[in-house]
Amino acid sequence: MSGITATNKFLSLIKDAESLVADDKQMEIKKVEEDRLAAELKAKQEAEVKAAAELKAKQESEVKAAATKKITITCLKGKLVTKVTGVKPVCPKGYKKK
């Protein structure tokens, strides 16, 4: 009878060890999943920051484009009159600004 009892205790210890190993595996799987989710969240946040920076840069370039108005100047060479339009217009060679 003591042989059967020892065998039962031994089997019980094996089952306990197997359940501990199974618990460790489940905890490891949960940790891997948490790490994966954290990495995905970080990547998503970085993408949002990058998109916001690109949008801000685009808006700034649009503001600069609107701020750079074209102006027109009149240039004279004798009786010839030429109008030059641009952001920083310059009279052609030989012409003087009116």
Image (cartoon, helix red, strand yellow):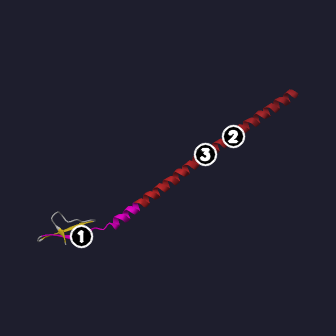
Amino acid on which the number 2 mark rests in the picture: Asp
Which segment did they paint magenta? 58-77
- Return the disc, 3 or 2, that comes first in the chain's sequence: 2
x, y percentage for residue 92? 18, 64
- Return the disc, 1 or 3, that comes first in the chain's sequence: 3
CA neighbours of label 3 inside 10 A, class few (<14), some (14 to 19), many (20+):
few
- Return the disc, 1 or 2, that comes first in the chain's sequence: 2
Q: Secondary structure at mark 3?
A: helix
On the picture, is 98 further left or further right than 5? left
CA neighbours of label 1 inside 10 A, class few (<14), some (14 to 19), many (20+):
few
Q: Secondary structure at mark 1?
A: strand
Residue at the (43%, 61%) spot, across then down: 56
Residue at the (76%, 33%) spot, across then down: 14
Q: Quick one: quadrant of the N terminus?
A: top right
Between the residue at mark 3 and the residue at mark 2, the CA separation in whole angstroms equals 14 Å
x, y percentage for residue 62? 37, 63
Amino acid on which the number 1 mark rests in the picture: Thr
Q: Which mark is residue 2?
A: none
Q: Which residue is tagged 1?
A: 72
Q: Which residue is tagged 3?
A: 33
Foreground residue among 91 and 35: 91
Between the residue at mark 1 and the residue at mark 2, the CA separation in whole angstroms equals 79 Å
Q: Is residue 63 magenta?
A: yes
